[in-house]
Amino acid sequence: MTHHSPSELAPDDAALIARWRGGDERAVTLLVERHAQAIARFVASLGERDEIEEVVQDTFVRAFGSLDSFRGDSTFRTWLLTIARNLLRDRQRGRKRAGVHVEIQDDDLVSSSDALEGAVASETERRLRAAVEMLSPLQRSIFTLRVTEGLSYKEIAIAVGSTEGAARVHYHNAMRAIREKIDE
Amino acid sequence: MSECTNGEMRDLLPELVNGRLDAELQLAVEAHVAECAECAAEVTLLRSLRPALMSAPVIDTQRIAAAVRAQTAAPRQRGPARRVTPWRVAIAAAALVAVGAIGDAVVTRGRTATESVAAHAPDSSSGDNPAHAAAAPIAAPVARAPRTAPAPAPPQQVAVAAPAARPTGASGGVLDNLSDLSDDDVRTLTASLDGMSAVPDVESAPEVDPLGASLDAHSSGGT
């Protein structure tokens, strides 16, 4: 028996982009619903605390505003991740110019999940979360993309502006650090 | 803590947890995990970590989508950018020549006896104008918005008569005047040319409504 999941029946990104290019604005909604959570996770993993939704929104606005430059060399999601990273970098530079302290400390990283604390189910999950949050933003973002989004090292390298080899090393270092933290 | 030395298999553990391996590879990785305590422990850890990592920030995707729609317009709704390009200027020049010819003809006709026109071109004077005036809008694409340009009828008639009026060298005068045009004049003329049905400024206008409707029907029909 062949079973088709909803995602298999849904139009793929290329089809939705083509529909948008043809004037169908509902395609925007479908693409946002499909990718926004992943972008939000990525933005949070890079240390953004207060304006995650705003960054996600700006990412999509920027993407649809320059969709002509999307050639499909990478997946649409990877392209969105790249835009999100650039936006976040620009914001952090802007804050730095404005004199706002932007250096991300470990304490900040732990508190970055304050909004989620209410949903923490167990001590185990809290320890796991703490282990992830002790990673550097780059390590954490790579680890998150690998584990939650299932991206390949090549896709991760594009998203974070690194190399495939470096992404692999960061992932395994992150995994080692988490295991050590858990075993403490 | 020891680590598995089979880097190829270790690299595939996240894919195994995410269910992204094809059947054959999944069996191979699962067989390795069954024999490798380190990889088994890592798989267990990944399966524990994934829910914690997935429960990331709560965002309002509907609000984001609405904001994105409000700030960006689908290509068909934006309309083409209008620029002054060399070919548009060339068309403008050609149009000026035609306008000059129209002027010449009108003046000539005003000065010469009406009977000569009637004598040499009885058919055109008797019924062409109304016929062409009516035909022009019909010839335009159906999808276009109706335009209220009153000019099309006279040019149809004068364009035939123009060569006969040319020997005086009036066209040279028109081209001379062209160099006196300001940029604004050229833009205005170019814009008016964009409105003429002869200029292919709308590449796929006929498909806008029918294709859009069919796509909508197809996507929502669930066949």
Image: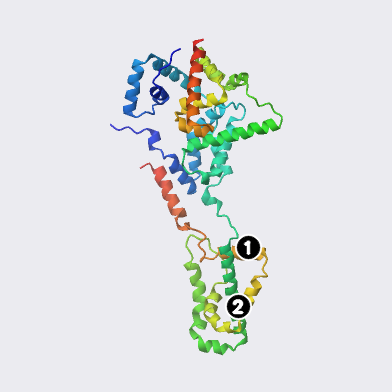
Q: Along the horizontal axis of the image, is B42 left or right of B112?
A: left
Residue A122 badge: none
Q: Quadrant of residue B40?
A: top left
**Kind of residue sitting beneath label 2:** Ser
* Percent x, y of residue A171: 49, 24
| Looking at the image, residue B153 lies above or below residue B66 | below
Secondary element under disc 2, as helix, strand or loop, is helix
The residue sitting at 68% across, 26% down in the picture is A101
Identity of the residue drawn at 38% across and 41% down = B222
Q: Dividing the picture into quarters, in which one does residue A6 lie?
A: top left
Q: Nearer the viewer, residue B86 or B50?
A: B86
Q: How many numbered dots are placed on residues in this image?
A: 2
Asked if residue B215 can be seen in this view, the reply is yes
Residue tagged by mark 1? B187
Q: Please name whichever residue, B132 or B159, is drawn nearer the observer in this view of the structure.
A: B159
Look at the numbered disc 1 and give the secondary structure of its residue. helix
Do marks 2 and 1 share a chain?
A: yes
Residue visible at 62% across and 82% down in the picture: B107
Q: Nearer the viewer, mark 2 or mark 1?
A: 2
Q: Residues within 10 Å of mark 1 (few under 14, many from 20)?
A: some
Which percent across, then down, holds residue A118? Answer: 55, 18
Label 2: how many Cα within 10 Å (few below 14, some 14–19, many 20+)? some
Q: What residue do we see at 37% from left, 32% from top?
A: A5
Q: Chain of mark 2?
A: B
